Image (tube, rainbow, N blue to C red):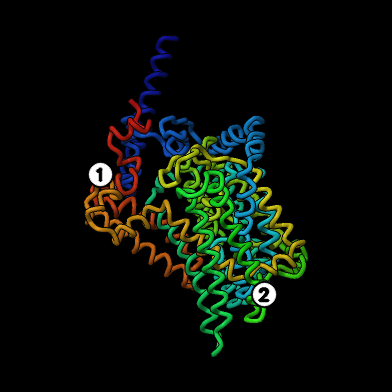
Amino acid sequence: HPRKAVQMHNHVQRRSGKRRSSVTRTLRTNVAWVFPVLSLLQRRRRLGHYKSPAARLTEHHAVDGTTIQKSNHIRAEGVRDDMQRRWAAGKYMSDWIDGMHPKSIATVTFMYFACLAPIVAFGQLTGMITNGALSVQHFLASSALSGMCYALFAGQPMTIVGPTGLTFAYVGALYNLCVQNSWPFLSLYAWTGLWCALLLAFLACGGACSLLVFVTQFTDDIFNGLVVITFLITACQQIASPFLAAGVDKTLPFVNAALALGTFIVAGTCHITRSSRFLRHCIRQFLADFGPAIAMGGATIAAHSSLLAGVAHVDGLMVPCNLDLGRPIFLPLLPAAGVPIWVPLASLPPAVFLSVSFFLDQNITSRVVNKPSYGLRKGATYHLDLLVLAVIVAVCSILGLPWMVGSTVQSLSHVRAMTIYSSGDDESSAVVTGVIETRFTGVVVSSLIGASFLLLPLLRCVPASAINGLFLYLGIHMMRGNAFFQRVRLLLYDPKFYAEGLNGVRPVVAHSFTALQAICLICLWRMRSAPSIALAFPLAVLLLVAIRLFLAPWLFQEQDLIRLDEALPERCNRGTLLSRGIYTR
């Protein structure tokens, strides 16, 4: 009978549903014993108190921090949504039209030297540790190609890709591994990059960038602090080492130190003229924008002046004489070209660590660039940026060029150089009219770096000590905006002025939180400096996230963590979640 058939079908469906729910409850119970965080998130989602990390990640704040746009990025939908949002005809054209601004001239001049300095520095160091396999000319070619492709196709063109200290340490450890085991370095290097590109593409299309919701300012400040300290220590070593190598006559080291410090002082003085009461606003704006370029030009003129001609010969930049890479353009990858058949498999474990490093480095840089305080209007595109980086890494690996990834110092310098301040207000009051988000400056800077091969005689006229001064300026300049360094500076203040920088937190709690960050930073620096464990360094960065998720809540109260850092999704109270649009009624 039809009615009995329907009743029998419903009865079977109910019994099967009960069995499935029983199995599901058993699995969830077992998972809860192993992963308490997953169990907590499941309970939050069932109660409707918590949205997925993808929904949290893709909340783009407007300039005033109140308007929030929400969209779920799951699997390839994140990349597709990023493409639709930033590759649309109107918005893509606006990225070029907005760049036709007088401020772009100063930004291009400053960013050219800001990007060229680490290229030359890391190129020389990498050439020494790899016995010339990767040298300055390879870094120049890779930076020009990678920077131009990223500026053209990435969703957030304000991010600058370039060489970093973490990549330098990883390449050095990989080369030492190949030398100790008599492995072909370039072939292993190429396959490591190809596997890394595949893993990054998989992470981008799989929505792994949504996990950045668990990365807070605690991790950002420590990671960026490591980059800043790397810049400062590199500059100080380059300034102090000539004194140790020189004999009795220390005239040349003193001249180089004077040029470096002079470049740093002139650039810093021009930068703070924006908040000065002297001169007209247009002159102060010009000096603040062109300060680094003025400092570099002044150091170059002073190095070749008649006053120093008979005193000391100042060394210029150590750039190559031509574009000769010293080997074929494409690296051998297949066994038919003489590559051992085990190389592709042997390169997979190092590629996993490299992909973790690039994933964290790129996304933390993008996260810092897209902070609501900078007022970027066009939104973040984490998934698309990571996918474009994966393609760039693959191309550089096939060509045997150094890998490039998001560089925090250059990216923040790019954003701040394109920031427009309201007329008549100083920078210290943090009155920002907006940021010119454009692809024009990134493409022009990368093109100039590629054209540096045509300007080699002129680049050799630029004193290397001026580059050290620019390193000092970039390092000190990037300390501004880092909450960790701001709290460290409070240790030198009179305690009665603590209330201005602690946001209502007791001083002993703030100092304890700063001490925890300092311990993590010191451990990261020691691990980065140890060649034997440099390959596993990305796992140490992941450990920072675990410390913030599990250790910090045991040491500090939740309200203090929210004021000193920021609230985690699963630990936000109802009022905070409602105010941020995360809590659903």
Residue 584 is left or right of residue 282, and the answer is: left
Give the residue drawn at x 31%, y 46%. Answer: 36
Give the residue drawn at x 64%, y 53%. Answer: 109
Q: How many marks?
A: 2
Q: Position of residue 520 (x, y in %)?
A: 36, 62
Residue 180's place in the image compared with 469, above or below, is: below
Quadrant of the image containing the N terminus: top left
Residue on which disc 1 sits: 559
Residue 117's place in the image compared with 159, above or below, is: below
Q: Is residue 46 visible?
A: no
**Depth check, front residue: 105 or 523:** 105
Q: Distance from label 1 to label 2 (Cα)?
A: 63 Å
Q: Is residue 94 visible?
A: yes
Give the residue type that dot 1 points to.
Gln
Give the residue drawn at x 65%, y 67%. Answer: 301
Residue on which disc 2 sits: 306
* Label 1: which secondary element: helix
* Label 2: which secondary element: helix
Q: Earlier in the sequence, mark 1 or mark 2?
A: 2
Q: Position of residue 271 (x, y in %)?
A: 50, 54
Give the residue type that dot 2 points to.
Ser
**Depth check, front residue: 495 or 408:** 495
Residue 250 is left or right of residue 579, and the answer is: right
Q: Position of residue 190 (x, y in %)?
A: 66, 62
Q: Position of residue 328 (x, y in %)?
A: 78, 65
Q: Residues within 10 Å of mark 2 (few under 14, many from 20)?
A: few
Give the residue drawn at x 39%, y 49%. Answer: 217
Q: Residues within 10 Å of mark 1 (few under 14, many from 20)?
A: some
Residue 274's place in the image compared with 244, above or below, is: above
**Depth check, front residue: 244 or 171:** 244
Q: Which mark is residue 420?
A: none
